[in-house]
Structures are given as structure tokens and as C-alpha cells.
């Protein structure tokens, strides 16, 4: 009787794998976008369905938490992890949305490199989340995410310095800086996601 009340713990792990797969696809498309010499006009329409799916997965996990008696690890950690992953998708969508709103057509220096770092970070997170159920020691992948964030910081600073020296139009400068700010923010969010995973691994070791 009581067995039927217990949650199937693998559902949470499957949700983590599902959402990171969608975020990885968003990061891949975003990088291809910023790597192009001519920015694709319909990029927002390509990313929006993926971001919507991430929101749906996040909402489903939070609802399940409210009805679950036993969770595979701390509720707070499950909530924090799913929200941080979902927020990466929000930032990526918001970044390309601003490209459209600001009508930016010329390539932004540094955006290609930062978007590649985001993609690499998410690939590392994906490796960890694919095996999180086994509580493996994926510390190396988490460390790689943090090392990549440091690399992103260096690119961000040097790119901004160059932007403020070379860009003479104040409005264009503002637009480009905000795009770079959001990409750097996505890198930070990947690192904070890795920090949550490290905490989970340590607590459950």
C-alpha cells in the first residue's frame, strides 16, 4: 500500500537530463548565431520553443516536489538545480531577443567566444547530469565549468576594454555591451549550477 505512495526517484534525474539537453541545443544554436558573419533574423523563433520546454520541465519538477514525500536528495537542492538550469535558457533567449529588439546586424566582437564557452560549460554540465543518479564523483567536470567561467571573465574584460576604446557611437556601445553582459551572465549561471551539483555530490558522498 505505502509503496505506491513513494515517488519514482528516477523521474527527477530524467527531468535534469531532459532540461539540460534542451539548454545544450539552445547554446549550440546561440553559438552558431554569434559565429555567423550575418545574424539570422529568425533566431528568436528557433530558441523560443526550446526555452518554453525548459519552463515546462521546471514547473513539472517544482509541482512534483510539493507532492513527494521522499526525494533522492534535499528538496532545496532539487529546486535550486532545476531553477538555475532553467535560468540559463532564459538568459540565452533574452540575449537573442535583444539582438532583434536592438536591430543589431553587425558581428559583436567577443560574442562568438563567450557563446562557445557557454556551450562548452553546458556540455560539461550535461556529462554530470547524465550520471547524477549514480552519485558519481564528477568533480572534474564541475571544475571545468568553473575554469571556463574564469576564461570567460578574461574575454569579457578585454572585449569591453576594446569596445570602449573603439566604439564612438554611444547607443551602439550600449547595445553591444548589454549583449556581452548577458553572455557573461550566462557563464556565471553555469558556474553557479556547477556549485549546486558539487554541493549535492558532497552531501551524498
Image (cartoon, rainbow, N blue to C red):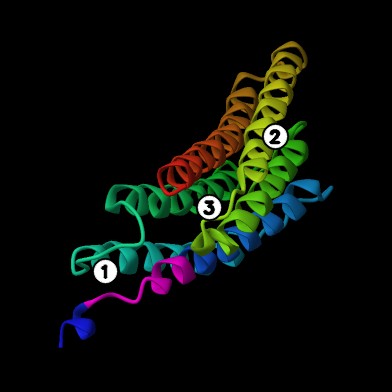
Is 69 on the left or on the right of 54, as rendered?
left
Proximity of marks 1 and 2: CB atoms separated by less than 8 Å: no
Say which of marks 1 and 3 sits in front. Answer: 1
The extreme bottom residue here reads: 1
Position of 62 relative to 120 (above/below): below
Residue 76: image location, x then y, percent: 29, 48
Position of 116 relative to 27 (above/below): above
Q: Name the residue rendered at 56%, 58% in the picture.
A: 129
Q: Tag 2: Cα neighbours inside 10 Å, few (<14), some, or many (≥20)?
A: many
Residue at mark 1 to residue at mark 3: CA–CA distance: 26 Å
Find disc 1 in the rendering and name its residue: 64
Q: Nearer the viewer, residue 189 or 47?
A: 189
The extreme front residue here reads: 205
Residue range (magenta): 6-15
Q: Nearer the viewer, residue 162 or 123?
A: 123
Q: Tag 3: Cα neighbours inside 10 Å, few (<14), some, or many (≥20)?
A: many
Q: Name the residue rendered at 36%, 54% in the picture.
A: 78
Find disc 3 in the rendering and name its residue: 93
Residue 173: image location, x then y, percent: 64, 23
- Say which label, 3 or 2, has the lower sequence index: 3
Report helix, strand or loop for mark 3. helix
Magenta part, dominant SS: helix
Is 45 on the left or on the right of 1, as rendered?
right
- Say which label, 1 or 2, has the lower sequence index: 1
The extreme top residue here reads: 165
Q: Name the residue rendered at 74%, 25% in the picture.
A: 155
The extreme left residue here reads: 1
- Residue 148, disc: 2
Can residue 50 be seen by looking at this rendering?
Answer: no
Amino acid at each position: 500500500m505505502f509503496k505506491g505512495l513513494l515517488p519514482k526517484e528516477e523521474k527527477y534525474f530524467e527531468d535534469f537530463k531532459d532540461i539540460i539537453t534542451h539548454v545544450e541545443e539552445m547554446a549550440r544554436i546561440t553559438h552558431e548565431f554569434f559565429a555567423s558573419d550575418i545574424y539570422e533574423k529568425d533566431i528568436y523563433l528557433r530558441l523560443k520553443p526550446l526555452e518554453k520546454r525548459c519552463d515546462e520541465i521546471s514547473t513539472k519538477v517544482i509541482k512534483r516536489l510539493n507532492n513527494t514525500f521522499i526525494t533522492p536528495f534535499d528538496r532545496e537542492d532539487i529546486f535550486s538545480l532545476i531553477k538555475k538550469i532553467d535560468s540559463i535558457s532564459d538568459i540565452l533567449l533574452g540575449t537573442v531577443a535583444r539582438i532583434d529588439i536592438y536591430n543589431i546586424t553587425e558581428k559583436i566582437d567577443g560574442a562568438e567566444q563567450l557563446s562557445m564557452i557557454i556551450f562548452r560549460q553546458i556540455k560539461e554540465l550535461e556529462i554530470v547530469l547524465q550520471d547524477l543518479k549514480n552519485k558519481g564523483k564528477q568533480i572534474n567536470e564541475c571544475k571545468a565549468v568553473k575554469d571556463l567561467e574564469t576564461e570567460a571573465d578574461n574575454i569579457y574584460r578585454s572585449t569591453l576594454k576594446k569596445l570602449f576604446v573603439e566604439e564612438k557611437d554611444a547607443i551602439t556601445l550600449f547595445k553591444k555591451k548589454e549583449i556581452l553582459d548577458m553572455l557573461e551572465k550566462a557563464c556565471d549561471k553555469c558556474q553557479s549550477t556547477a556549485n549546486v551539483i558539487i554541493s549535492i555530490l558532497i552531501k551524498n558522498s
